[in-house]
């Protein structure tokens, strides 16, 4: 049996300069790019996601962009399916694959298990959705009740409504305690365990990264972020969708709904703060995945 194609992962916090670095690497190594960005999968969310421009996409083939509408859900399981197809397609045409992006949960797929692949019935999904209409606290309370304790496992981020929803769905579908599900999950091979995976983490000093974030925010506001947010508002998005919670878009939609009472500079400051919070989350993922900056660059 032929060896599985090699995968190179180039990641780093938002605004660090991944897009141009990825293009340069791919052109030098006869590779195509697979986006590992949970916002770039949405059509029409271009400016605020810093999606590669038309000119950048014309330089070489990209995979994983513009896959679904903002009103649709897109899971890590779907991402893995897209990634597998892209890797196979590129390999068959004699091309390598470069994975680039900063979405931690997607990145984790290349370094270990990301889903237990438990089948979740429509009845369970509907039950949990009904609970969601009562707010995150109702979902958390239901999970605590079925677990028989208010002290949920420390590895579950109970402040993240999406994680709590997923945990409740799997708890209901399997009938097994969360820790038991976690133990089995950690024993599973990752979806790309048979592929040789190399990685590179781009980083910059905090001061420099903050300046780049601020400059990018100004450019996004000039280049159409507000128009994209106005369009998202017309779609009446479920607030739990990733598209509704995306950094930059969420603040801009709230600004628009508030009648633009805050000056544009105030919106930019809010986006910068939200973006820096995202950087901190991304860096936690990098540490969890044991990704380290290349100090030789």
Image (spheres, rainbow, N blue to C red):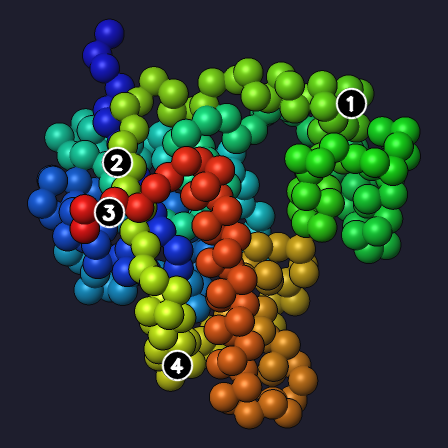
Q: Secondary structure at mark 3?
A: loop
**Gap between marks 4 and 1 measured at Cα:** 47 Å
Q: Is residue 37 above or below residue 144?
A: below
**Residue under circle 2?**
8
**Residue under circle 4?**
218
Residue at figure coordinates x 55%, y 16% from the top left: 187
**Residue under circle 3?**
295
In the foreground, 182 or 142: 182
First-in-chain label (4 vs 1): 1
Q: How many marks?
A: 4
Q: Secondary structure at mark 4?
A: helix
First-in-chain label (3 vs 1): 1
**Residue under circle 1?**
177
How far from the left and from the top, in percent, is residue 49? Answer: 42, 63
Q: Is residue 182 above or below residue 28?
A: above
Q: Is residue 67 above or below residue 14?
A: above
The image quadrant that residue 33 belongs to is top left
How far from the left and from the top, in percent, is residue 133? Answer: 82, 54
Q: Is residue 149 above or below residue 179?
A: below
Residue at figure coordinates x 16%, y 34% from the top left: 95
The image quadrant that residue 195 belongs to is top left
How far from the left and from the top, in percent, is residue 142? Answer: 87, 39
First-in-chain label (4 vs 3): 4
**Gap between marks 3 and 1 measured at Cα:** 43 Å
How far from the left and from the top, in percent, is residue 252? Answer: 55, 76
**Gap between marks 3 and 2 measured at Cα:** 18 Å
Front of the two marks 3 and 2: 3
């Amino acid at each position: 049996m032929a060896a599985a194609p090699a995968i190179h992962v180039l990641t780093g916090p938002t605004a660090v300069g991944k897009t141009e670095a990825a293009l340069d690497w791919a052109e030098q190594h006869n590779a195509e790019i697979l986006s590992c960005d949970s916002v770039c999968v949405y059509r029409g969310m271009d400016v605020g996601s810093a999606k590669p421009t038309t000119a950048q996409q014309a330089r070489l083939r990209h995979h994983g962009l513009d896959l679904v509408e903002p009103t649709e859900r897109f899971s890590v399981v779907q991402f893995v399916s897209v990634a597998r197809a892209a890797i196979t397609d590129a390999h068959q045409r004699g091309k390598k694959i470069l994975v680039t992006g900063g979405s931690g949960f997607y990145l984790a797929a290349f370094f270990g298990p990301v889903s237990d692949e438990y089948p979740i019935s429509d009845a369970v999904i509907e039950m949990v959705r009904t609970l969601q209409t009562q707010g995150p606290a109702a979902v958390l309370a239901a999970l605590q009740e079925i677990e028989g304790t208010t002290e949920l496992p420390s590895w579950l981020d109970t402040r993240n409504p999406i994680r709590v929803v997923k945990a409740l769905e799997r708890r209901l579908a399997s009938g097994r305690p969360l820790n038991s599900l976690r133990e089995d999950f950690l024993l599973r091979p990752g979806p790309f365990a048979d592929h040789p995976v190399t990685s590179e983490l781009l980083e910059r000093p905090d001061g420099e990264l903050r300046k780049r974030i601020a400059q990018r925010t100004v450019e996004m506001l000039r280049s159409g972020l507000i128009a994209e947010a106005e369009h998202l508002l017309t779609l009446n998005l479920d607030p739990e969708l990733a598209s509704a919670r995306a950094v930059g878009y969420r603040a801009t939609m709230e600004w628009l709904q508030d009648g633009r009472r805050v000056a544009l500079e105030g919106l930019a400051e809010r986006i910068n703060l939200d973006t820096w919070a995202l950087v901190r989350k991304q860096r936690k993922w990098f540490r969890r995945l044991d990704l380290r900056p290349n100090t030789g660059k």
